[in-house]
């Protein structure tokens, strides 16, 4: 820690000195930006706040609590820890609610620095985004009406499953159905509330996505089927060109996996 303080102090002084030289001996000085030694992280420092895309409807991960008006969950705490690391202030983070469909474009446009939003790491997605080490692994499930009496995917032959656009769910269920010799149809929606409404009104017979997400849509008339289809490992995503940022945040996640921080957050939210 002492060494780090010294390094930061030195960089600060250098910034001030350089500023004076560039100003040609005039009185103006460059703002004393504390360089972190990482160009991508320095950009966030200069911006004054960290911008993170999170879920607003996933209990335990990213939930905008309507009673408090604040975001809460494991992924929210991770974003705050990153802000604390950069600014020594966990409140210097601006949250943007994202869906499976919007999170990639928001990263591409540079509107957000990270996505921490139940984003499954896949080989295909690694070609488009940087992902950190895995901080949690969920699994794909099915939500159905209790009154329908379904017990598993095998009961859904000829039925329609509602899935989110740009999510992994369709491929996973297609594969699971094929292995059971059943054929299911799909309807794709932009958001989860739309799929739940479609389930309630009978336009779809099942709602499929990660179980963590489905838990946010439980009510008296619907239930989660017991089976889990394919693991969904979550990582922090960043824009592909921000390699420095990706390796820096991966260093943090790796540290948190090693020192029990992630384990404690998983216990805190009972995940
Ligand atoms: N985790 C899955 C995915 O990344 C489900 C979609 C979502 O996170 O909303 O595709």
Image (cartoon, grey):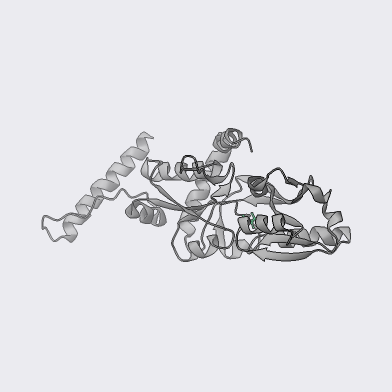
Of residue 199 and residue 35, the one placed in the foreground of this image is: 199
What residue is at 47 percent from the left and 60 percent from the top? Answer: 242
What residue is at 48 percent from the left and 46 percent from the top? Answer: 79
Considering only vertical position in the picture, is 195 above or below 93?
below
In the rendered image, residue 209, in percent from the top left (x then y), is placed at 69, 54
Residue at the farthest front position: 201
- In this picture, residue 246 sits left or right of residue 142: left
Q: How many marks?
A: 0
- Ligand 1: give its quadrant: bottom right
Considering only vertical position in the picture, is 254 above or below 100?
above
Residue at the farthest right position: 181
What residue is at 60 percent from the left and 45 percent from the top? Answer: 135
Of residue 24 and residue 49, the one placed in the foreground of this image is: 49
Considering only vertical position in the picture, is 22 above or below 95?
below
Quadrant holding the N terminus: top left
- Quarter location, residue 91: top left
Of residue 176 and residue 225, the one placed in the foreground of this image is: 225
- In this picture, residue 193 sits left or right of residue 181: left
In the rendered image, residue 248, in percent from the top left (x then y), is placed at 47, 50
- In this picture, residue 206 sits left or right of residue 4: right
Quadrant holding the C terminus: top right
In the rendered image, residue 18, in percent from the top left (x then y), is placed at 22, 55
In the rendered image, residue 213, in percent from the top left (x then y), is placed at 64, 49
- In this picture, residue 184 sits left or right of residue 82: right
- Quarter location, residue 219: top right
């Amino acid at each position: 820690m002492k060494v780090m303080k010294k390094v930061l102090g030195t960089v600060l002084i250098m910034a001030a000195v350089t500023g004076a030289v560039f100003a040609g001996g005039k009185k103006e000085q460059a703002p004393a930006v504390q360089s972190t030694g990482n160009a991508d992280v320095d950009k966030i420092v200069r911006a004054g706040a960290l911008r993170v895309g999170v879920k607003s409807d996933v209990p335990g991960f990213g939930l905008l609590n309507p009673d408090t008006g604040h975001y809460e969950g494991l992924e929210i705490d991770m974003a705050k820890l990153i802000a604390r690391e950069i600014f020594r202030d966990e409140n210097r983070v601006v949250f943007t609610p994202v869906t499976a469909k919007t999170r990639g474009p928001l990263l591409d446009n540079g509107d957000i620095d990270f996505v921490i939003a139940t984003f499954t790491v896949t080989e295909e997605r690694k070609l488009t985004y940087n992902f950190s080490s895995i901080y949690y692994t969920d699994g794909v499930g099915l939500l159905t009406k209790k009154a329908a009496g379904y017990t598993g995917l095998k009961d859904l032959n000829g039925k329609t499953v509602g899935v989110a656009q740009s999510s992994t769910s369709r491929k996973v269920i297609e594969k699971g159905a094929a292995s059971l010799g059943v054929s299911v149809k799909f309807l794709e929606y932009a958001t989860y509330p739309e799929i739940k409404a479609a389930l309630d009104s009978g336009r779809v017979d099942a709602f499929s996505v990660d179980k963590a997400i489905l838990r946010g849509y439980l009510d008296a008339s619907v239930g989660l089927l017991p089976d889990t289809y394919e693991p969904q490992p979550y990582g922090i995503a960043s824009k592909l060109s921000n390699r420095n940022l990706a390796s820096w945040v991966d260093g943090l996640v790796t540290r948190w996996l090693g020192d029990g921080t992630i384990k404690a957050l998983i216990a805190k939210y009972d995940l």
